[in-house]
Amino acid sequence: MSYWEFLQTFGQRFLEGTLVTAEQFVLASMLAIFAALIAGLARLSRNPVINGTAVVYIEIFRGTSLLVQLFWVFYVLPLFGITLPKFVAGFVSVGLNVGAYGAEIVRGAIQSVPKGQYEAAIALNMTPAQRMRRIVLPQALMIMLPPWGNLLIELLKGTALVALISVADLMFQAKQINAANYLSAQAFGTALIIYYLLARFLITPAMRWAERVVARKMGLA
Amino acid sequence: MSVESYPLELTGSDIPMVRFAGVTKRYGPLTVLDSLDLDIAANEMVSIIGPSGSGKTTVLRMLMTLETINDGVIYVDGQPLTHMPRNGKLVPADESHMRKQRMNVGMVFQHFNLFPHMTALENCMEAPVQVLGLPKAEARERSVELLKLVGLEDKMNQHPARLSGGQQQRVAIARALAMRPKVMLLDEVTSALDPEVIGEVLNVIRYLNKEYKLTMLMVTHQMGFAKEISDRVCFFFAGNIAEQGSPDQLFGDPQNERTKQFLRAVLDAN
Amino acid sequence: MFHWRWDFVWQILPDLLRATENTLIASVLGYAIALVLGLVLALAQRTPWQALTWAVREAVEFIRSTPLVLQIFFVFYVFPQFGVRLSPWTSGMIAIGLHYASYLSEVYRAGLDGVPRGQWEACRALNLSTGRTYFRIIIPQALPIALPGMGNYLVGIFKDTPMLSVIGVAELMHTANAIGSEYYRYLEPYTLVGLIFLAISLPTAAGMRWLEAAVRRALGMTK
């Protein structure tokens, strides 16, 4: 069949798969940002317990493979009494994994805020909490947006792995269509194109827009 | 004399606004301030000059609690800043004691350090609202007045990125004044400015010195300005005051050989 | 609840260690391919032929922005349909090599772009040949900039080898899956796999940081 016929026949399934991928992406992103903020700030703490816990989280999730983490969460965690439905196991693994990388971005960004800003805040007698909340974090936000843009694309690619625990996302649909019809080039090719469109024409422009908004808040646009 | 035996507070009718008593600051093996004794009277305008590495910026930074102290005590308005009384003796101050004392001191930095994500007005309002707990309307009123004073009322809704260096520094002065400190520290505030905008900042300082009841401590390379405006000039060398006196004395008839060398070198450069 | 069985651990460890060997070979091989191919892709984006530069640029963007696991499936299933029979190993190596070549081409590009323009101009002024310019002047300066990225991707490739399990390559993850489904016990296999990954990736990452510092020192460029 021609490619057009292929799309007409299976388009619906690709759409459904893309929807699930989008859901995984949004949920995993929210978890990743949350985890990254907490772990990133914890890494800057002078308390050895807080700092150490963050280091352990970051090193474990960065030092092992996302696929391994995914399988561990889905197959091994139940033995500890935590049974997550596969949809949840999916975005939790991806979110925690990407969050570990994000923590380093957050930490780096906060450390990039010029020392003079800290000193001005001290001179004005602000408390450390006020300093972080009102002066440092807003500036760190501007610094960390570009690397986060790249990280979110990595996150999108990571969600493809949840198909391997049978979550019915885009890649899962492509695999199914291939298994049933051997139209490998069309099935996998279409999936690749859709991922590409999501990354290049949705995520990247969205991040550029966010960067522009923040720049305007700093009077730089 | 160990720290413990320093007075818990300065008493009397004629106490200095700022006192450095035997203050020493070390960075590892390097001694930057060497048992410094320095008194600054209320409303006095003192300029500090000297070669780089002489410890002059460190004096300001320690007064602003940006650096820790290794020996000696710093007093502000009669109360210890770096230490606090406990059981009748002085011990190193904790953060809450320092916060209380720090209220009396404000600082303007060489590189302005304005908050880039806030407008000029917001920069000035930030600390009065957050730290002093002023209602926004009152903080706003105070800040607008100060921005008027430094001649930047029409720029109050601009971000620092849109302001020239001279304008940013004037906003920084307004921002420091908004906290109504008793002591103002000026750390080479014109060194990072293009020559044509230095004058506008010096004018503001001139005005402050004349019209405000403010104790000012200024580290500067602007010798002419220091001579014109100061009540006293201190020449620092190798971590202590090598010579000090009225501007006429120090610039006109320096006694110390090092002072003479420095002034000669500075004049040569100009 | 769970119950950790040490006897099971000793029973399966030899298989897992043998699989680790496969994983390491796959990583090193894939990385070697990516190093070379990445350079080709990077240089192909600096040619005077606009069409080629543009085409390579778009291809690199496409590969970088799409999931590796999907690319592995693509290579494994699609090539045979054009008459090219590929073993799982070969498909896997092609897919991983190409994927990481795209990443590395970006790292090389950043490295080359990071060398100040004045260096190129000085070489032109001294009439150095293109070869000498690249090898004696530009690349030594591009290297410290590129090295962190290159090191990251070595560790990255190692951690991505489990994706090869989906097409039947007998690396670590695939072996753990096989053990798990054979004995109905997943706790020990997956945990051991995790630990083995940590045991290899953490020292490698540390080694990479040491290497970067050593290279910078050797080139007299300590910050």
Image (cartoon, coloured by chain):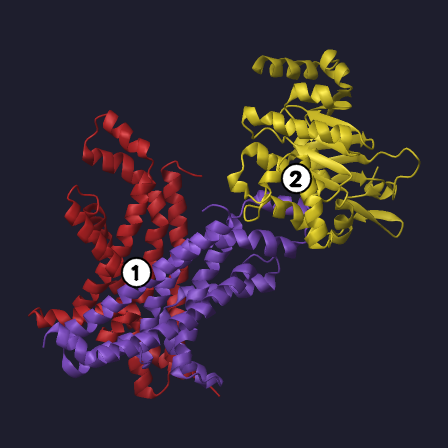
Chain colours: A purple, B yellow, C red
For disc 1, the chain is: A
Residue A8: x and y in percent read: 18, 78
Find numbered disc 1 in the image and state the secondary structure of the residue it sits on: helix
Instruction: Farthest residue to the left: give it.
Output: C83
The residue type indicated by label 2 comes to Leu
Q: Which mark is residue C85?
A: none
Q: Which mark is residue B147?
A: 2
- B25 sits to left or right of C57: right
Circles 2 and 1 on the same chain: no
> Residue shown at 31%/42% (left/top)?
C113
- C74 sits to left or right of B144: left
Instruction: Farthest residue to the top: give it.
Output: B253
- B220 sits to left or right of A55: right
The answer to whether any part of residue C67 appears in the image is no
Instruction: Find disc 1 in the rendering and name its residue.
Output: A200
Q: Is residue C76 above or below residue B58?
A: below
Instruction: Farthest residue to the front: give it.
Output: B154
The residue type indicated by label 1 comes to Arg
Foreground tag (2 vs 1): 2
Name the residue nearer the viewer: A137 or B28: A137
Q: Quadrant of residue B251?
A: top right
| Disc 1 residue crowd, few under 14, some 14–19, many 20+, Cα 10 Å | some
Find numbered disc 2 in the image and state the secondary structure of the residue it sits on: helix
> Residue shown at 75%/48% (left/top)?
B98
Q: Is residue C89 above or below residue C61?
A: below
Q: Quadrant of residue A194?
A: bottom left
